[in-house]
Image: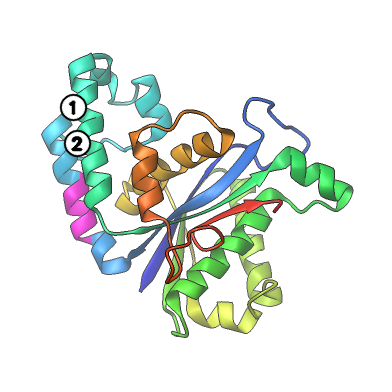
């Protein structure tokens, strides 16, 4: 079974558009279930023990950037350099595929006006399609795992998922989605899932890149992990930017 671990960057609210970050990014990593539960988890725990002497610290981009919630040692420059060097090596070596949908909210709203679809729902459609295409014609071949947020947002996501199973998407029938993807599971950050932490780490570099900000070393790794077609094309297969 293949699992799509989801994360997001930016606000999906179209009534509030931050001029410094006018994007909504929904994406993450697709990984084999057994691999994510065993080797990926072991490798991530080994990394944490080696750097912090514990496994309960949770890799979260915001905490890493702000040196908080266990990442206070990153204030020391040599340690910080070692942390990113070893983290980048780990991200490069692990086995997964990156998929992401980026919505340019200002352009989306300008083009569609009051008919503009919610960026989260639109992105979810795109990613569910990519997961189904990745799985192929296999019953219960996939699963979606997303991080719990709050009761309202979690309910919205569950409703969006149910809608996909009833209405389908532009390219997939509802019956195909329902048959191929076993379900949606909302998990707490405190559960320390390796796949969700990896999803968190790949999303921010994508947003920075699309905004035209200087790429850091992690984006080259993300770019190498994008889902691609047989000719190596990532646009439309691993990375979708809307509006087109």
- The reply to whether residue 62 is in sight is yes
- The reply to whether residue 53 is in sight is no
Check the picture and name the quadrant holding the N terminus.
Answer: bottom left
Taking the magenta stretch, the answer to whether it contains residue 20 is: no
- Residue 160 percent location from the top left of the image: 66, 61
* Mark 2 Cα shell of 10 Å, populated few (<14), some (14-19), many (≥20): some
- Residue 13 percent location from the top left of the image: 71, 40
Q: Name the residue under label 1.
A: 82
- Residue 149 percent location from the top left of the image: 53, 44
Residue in view at x 38 percent, y 70 percent: 2
Label 2 – label 1 distance at C-alpha: 6 Å
- Judge from the rendering whether residue 155 lies leftward or rightward of residue 3; answer left or right: right
Task: Place residue 202 in its image quadrant.
Answer: top left
Q: Height in image: 72 above or below 143? A: above
Foreground residue, 94 or 36?
94
Secondary structure character of the magenta stretch overall: helix
Residue in view at x 21 percent, y 42 percent: 89
Residue stretch rendered in magenta on the structure: 38-44
Q: Height in image: 92 above or below 212? A: below
Q: Name the residue under label 2.
A: 86
- How many dots with numbers? 2
- Residue 23 percent location from the top left of the image: 63, 38
Task: Place residue 127 in its image quadrant.
Answer: bottom right
Q: Which colour scheme is used?
A: rainbow
Identity of the residue furthest to the front in this view? 231
Identity of the residue furthest to the top in this view? 76
Q: Give the SS element for disc 2.
A: helix
- Judge from the rendering whether residue 232 lies leftward or rightward of residue 81; answer left or right: right
Mark 2 and mark 1 residues within 8 Å of each other at the beta carbon: yes
Identity of the residue furthest to the right in this view? 114
Residue in view at x 60 percent, y 62 percent: 126
Residue in view at x 66 percent, y 62 percent: 159
């Amino acid at each position: 079974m293949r699992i799509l671990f989801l994360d997001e960057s930016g606000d999906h609210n179209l009534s509030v558009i931050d001029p410094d970050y006018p994007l909504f990014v929904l994406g993450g990593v697709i990984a084999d279930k057994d691999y994510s539960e065993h080797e990926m988890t072991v490798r991530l725990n080994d990394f944490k023990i080696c750097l912090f002497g514990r496994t309960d610290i949770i890799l979260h981009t915001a905490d890493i950037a702000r040196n908080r919630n266990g990442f206070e040692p990153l204030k020391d420059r040599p340690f910080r350099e070692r942390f990113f060097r070893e983290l980048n090596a780990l991200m490069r070596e692990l086995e997964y595929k990156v998929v992401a949908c980026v919505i340019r909210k200002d352009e989306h709203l300008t083009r569609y006006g009051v008919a503009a679809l919610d960026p989260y729902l639109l992105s979810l459609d795109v990613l569910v399609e990519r997961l189904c295409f990745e799985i192929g014609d296999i019953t219960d071949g996939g699963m979606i795992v997303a991080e719990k947020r709050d009761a309202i947002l979690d309910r919205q996501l569950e409703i969006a998922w149910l809608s996909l199973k009833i209405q389908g998407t532009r390219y997939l029938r509802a019956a195909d989605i329902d048959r191929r993807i076993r379900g949606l599971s909302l998990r707490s950050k405190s559960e320390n899932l390796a796949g969700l932490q990896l999803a968190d780490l790949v999303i921010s570099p994508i947003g920075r890149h699309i905004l035209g900000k200087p790429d850091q070393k992690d984006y080259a790794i993300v770019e190498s992990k994008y889902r691609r077609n047989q000719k190596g094309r990532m646009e439309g297969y691993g990375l979708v930017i809307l509006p087109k």
